[in-house]
Amino acid sequence: MSVRSDRSGRCRDGSRDWLLVPRLLGRLIIPVRCAGCGRYDIAWCRSCQGAWVPAGFRCELQVPRLNRSDSITLPVWALTAYDGASRLAILAAKAGGRHDLHPVMASRLAYAAWCRRAALAVNQDRIAVVPVPSSSRAIRERGADMTGLLAREVARNCGWQMAALLCTSGRKRDQVGLGRAARQRNIAGTIQVVHRRLSPQFRQAVLIDDIVTSGATLHHSRKALEACGIRVVGAMVLAATAP
Ligand SMILES: [Zn+2]
């Protein structure tokens, strides 16, 4: 978070920033720190954001569940590797209450989707942007539906339609903190299509998730949509774990 004013409280355009004093007082009480490296007085520093590739990179070949189980591998774009400062920033945004990071992460994913839109779909008019579902318990505990927010921004930026076509059922735990095998057991059979939200206008779908680890969530989401006649043309995620 940058301060646009000088010491007199005057902004660079000459006007006074009346929120400067309350903002500085607020920082004294609750200091802002970079979610990646912990640097003071900034929410997410340039150096930490520098590890994110603006247009994203293909990562499906390092995702075992996608690469081995399907005859057609699902193309997946990620913006960063899920480690170091990027991992800390995503964890803070996802489960650490740092909801201030959601808009900037969403806008980065939306920009990457815009760059990749030609590769994602042939017919740009009939694309549903589908967030992979989180359990209602996880959304309640985290205080926000992060994948829903990401999907909404991708849809808005690309001129597509956000559609929450998937839901979870059964006893799914939060995926945070689970290993690869536990994630696959946790997710198997719990992702279902919300049939009342289906529309003939949705012929293709782009899946949105925050992190891809084993690929189990994307795999089961894809299977559920394709069973309803919707072709999943790709997925966009914030981060991919190392193989
Ligand atoms: Zn930082």
Image (spheres, grey):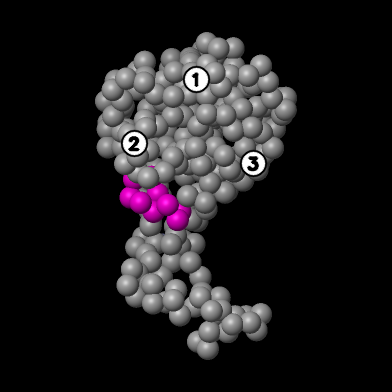
SS assignment for the magenta stretch, majority: helix
What crowding class fits label 2: few (fewer than 14 Cα within 10 Å), some (14-19), or many (20 or more)? some
Quarter of the image holding residue 6?
Answer: bottom right
Residue 194, which numbered label? 1
Instruction: Please tell me which residue is depicted at 47% across the width and 44% down the height of the picture.
Output: 80
| Nearer mark to the viewer, of 1 and 3 | 1
Q: Of callouts 1 and 3, which one flags the residue occurring earlier in the amino acid sequence?
A: 3
Q: Is residue 5 above or below residue 84?
A: below
Tell me if residue 96 can be seen: yes
Magenta highlight range: 93-101
Q: Which residue is drawn at 43% across and 15% down?
A: 69
From the image, tell me which residue sits under label 3: 156
How far, Cα to Cα, is label 1 from label 3? 22 Å
Looking at the rendered structure, the kind of residue marked 2 is: Ala
Circle 3 crowding by C-alpha within 10 Å: few under 14, some 14–19, many from 20: few
Q: Where is residue 128 in the image (x, y as percent from the top left)?
A: 61, 27
Q: Quadrant of residue 205?
A: top right
Which amino acid is tagged 1?
A: Val
Is residue 169 shown in magenta?
A: no
In magenta segment, residue 99: yes
Percent position of residue 199, x then y: 63, 19
Q: In this view, does 30 lie above or below 60?
A: below
Which mark sits nearer the N-terminus, 3 or 2?
2
Mark 1 or mark 2: which comes first in sequence?
Answer: 2
Q: What element carries label 3?
A: helix
